[in-house]
Image: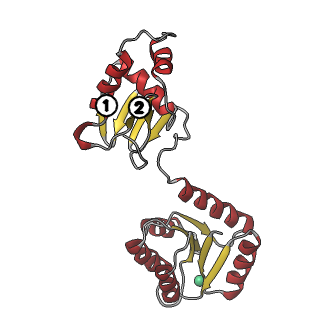
Amino acid sequence: MKKILLVEDETSVASFIKKGLSEEGYEVSIALDGSTGLQMALVNSFDLIILDIMLPGINGIEVCRSIRQQNKSVAILFLTALGTSENVVIGLGAEADDYLIKPFKFIELLARVKSLLRRTEKATPARPASDGDEFQIGNLVVNDYTKIVKRGERIISLTSTEYRLLLLFIKNPKKVLSRLEILEAVWGINFDMATNVVDVYVNYLRKKIEKDGAPKLIHTVIGMGYVLKESNEDTN
Ligand code: CA
């Protein structure tokens, strides 16, 4: 169950939000002032913090800054009656993820909450980018539209065969590909020529993408072929 901390000094607003979010299946804790909210945020682990700005004691912006100094990953949504662009800028400058201006409809709040929780969930490695042209594993990114390959910030220059080989791997992450499958896909050869062309090209590719001690991504599966995956699991 997703845990949400609500820091809001108006008890009627706080209980209205808590009731609504609880009905949606979230576990909601309430703090009625800034210092209590900050303390709860630092001691417990929440998936999302909903933070009013005008609070007794420490205001929401200060609370947000202090939380960010300790825990970068929790999603923070500001609630504010101060709907001027200036205050919104201050809020996002304090590294909140989003804001909502009071008064708001519950359905708007719920939409923001869901979207923020989805965003933090998606922050896992090795997923293809939503834009279907981009593929990623670890910090290796292949953009099949621009044909640009990057490992971290470093641009890697590949020959067209190396590129097609890498594209095959990155479109099939974690799948063990046999030499024959690779031959068919990259060279258009549908029989085993008993050459080591696949091994040779895999080695070219490794030299380029696994340069300078970057973690290994292309692994040999003895008697089977090759697999592209992050090194944290087994084999070499
Ligand atoms: Ca308030």
Specify few, some or many for label 1: CA neighbours under 10 Å numbering under 14, 14-19, or 20 or more.
some
Give the SS element for disc 2: loop
Between the residue at mark 2 and the residue at mark 1, the CA separation in whole angstroms equals 17 Å
Q: Nearer the viewer, mark 2 or mark 1?
A: 2
The reply to whether the C-beta atoms of the residues labelled 2 and 1 are less than 8 Å apart is: no
- Residue drawn at x 43%, y 35% is 228
Q: Would residue 165 be found to the left or right of residue 16 on screen?
A: left
Q: Position of residue 140 (x, y in %)?
A: 39, 39
Nearer-the-camera pick, 16 or 234: 234
Q: Label 2 is placed on what type of residue?
A: Ile
Pointer 1: what residue? 206
The amino acid sitting under disc 1 is Arg
Furthest toward the right, the residue is: 23
Q: Nearer the viewer, residue 163 or 72?
A: 163
- Please give the residue where the numbered disc 2 appears in the rendered image: 222
Residue 144 visible in this rendered orientation of the protein = no
Residue 144, x across and y down, in percent: 47, 27
N-terminal label among 2 and 1 = 1
- The one nearer the camera, 20 or 197, is 197
